[in-house]
Amino acid sequence: MSEQDTGVQQLESVEILDSQQLGRTISRIAHQIIEKTALDSPDAPRVLLLGIPSGGVPLAERLQQKISQFTGLEVPVGSLDITLYRDDLRNKPHRALQETSIPDGGIDSSIVVLVDDVLFSGRTIRAALDALRDLGRPDAIQLAVLVDRGHRELPIRADYVGKNLPTSKDEDVRVDIAEIDGSDAVTLHRPVSQSVSGSEKPTTAEGDA
C-alpha cells in the first residue's frame, strides 16, 4: 500500500546538533550572558534565568550551572508557565498548567533572561512577556533560545541564539534534553519529498542574535 493510500506522510530526520555540540552551544550562550549582562563585574546587576516549560526549564538550569562554573556566581533560576497567557487557548486542545517558580526577591529591578528551546512564531515569548508583566517590573528582559527556526509572526528577536536554522513551515525541529527525553540532540524532521540527495544536510549557521 502506498503512502498516498495510507494517508501517512513519511518523514526523515536530520541531526543538527549531537550531545557534545549541544553542550558546547549551551556553554557559549552562558559566556554570552556573562558578557552582555556584565555579570562578572564588581557592580554586576541581579540576573535571573526563567525557563519556559517544558524544554526551557532544564536549559535554564544548565545555563545556571555553566555560569556558576565560569564565574563562581549562583544565578537564581526559576520557571515561567505561559499557558493562561497564550492567544490560541480557544483553538488548541486543553493544556495542562505547568509550574511557575520565581526565585526569592521576585523580578523587580533585575535582568530577566527568558530561556526556551525553540523560537518560531514568537507567540510563546509574547505570552511570556505578558506573564512577566503580572509578576513585577524588571529592569530588562532578554531572551535566550537554543534554536531559532525563523517564521516570526510577531516582532520578537532573541538576544542569545545557539543555532540559527532556516526551515520551512512543514518541517519540525525537535530538541531532546536528557533531563526530559533521556538524551541530548537537536533534529530536523521533514517530509521525505523534501529530502536532499545523499548525506547533504540543510544549511545551518551558528550566530548570535
Image: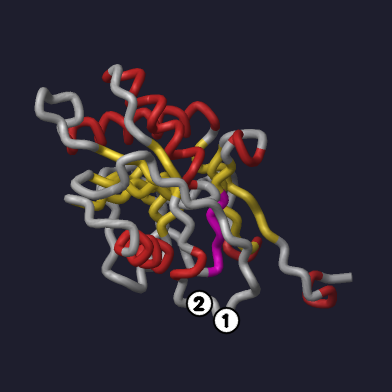
Q: Classify 10 Å Cα crowding around label 1: few (below 14), some (14-19), many (20 and above).
A: few
Q: Main secondary structure of the magenta part?
A: strand
Identified by mark 2, the residue type is: Asp
Instruction: Report the residue at 17% width, 50% height from top.
Output: 139
At mark 1, the secondary structure is loop
Query: Residue 124: x and y, percent?
Result: 43, 64
- At 13% from the left and 25% from the top, the residue drawn is 41
Magenta-highlighted residues: 170-174
Residue 192 placed where, x, y %?
Answer: 65, 61
Give the image location of residue 101, x and y in percent: 46, 46
Q: Which of 158 and 58 is in front in this view?
A: 58
Q: In which quarter of the image is residue 208?
A: top left
Q: Which numbered disc covers residue 91? A: 1
Q: Is residue 117 visible?
A: no
Q: Quadrant of residue 155?
A: bottom left
Left-right relation of 207 to 39: right
Q: Quadrant of the N terminus?
A: bottom right
The chosen color scheme is secondary structure
Task: Tell me the kind of residue under disc 1.
Answer: Asn
Q: In this view, does 157 lie to the left or right of 172?
A: left
Asked if the residue under mark 2 is in contact with the one under mark 1, i.e. CB atoms within 8 Å, the reply is yes
Extreme residue toward the right, this view: 1
| Residue where numbered disc 2 is placed | 88
Q: How crowded is mark 2: few (under 14 residues within 10 Å), some or many (20 or more)?
A: few
| Identity of the residue drawn at 44% across and 53% down | 80
The relative height of residue 36 versus residue 167 in the rendered view (above or below) is: above
Disc 1/disc 2 C-alpha distance (Å): 5 Å
Q: Position of residue 40 (x, y in %)?
A: 18, 24
Is disc 2 placed on a helix, strand or loop? loop
Name the residue at 63% across, 34% down: 183
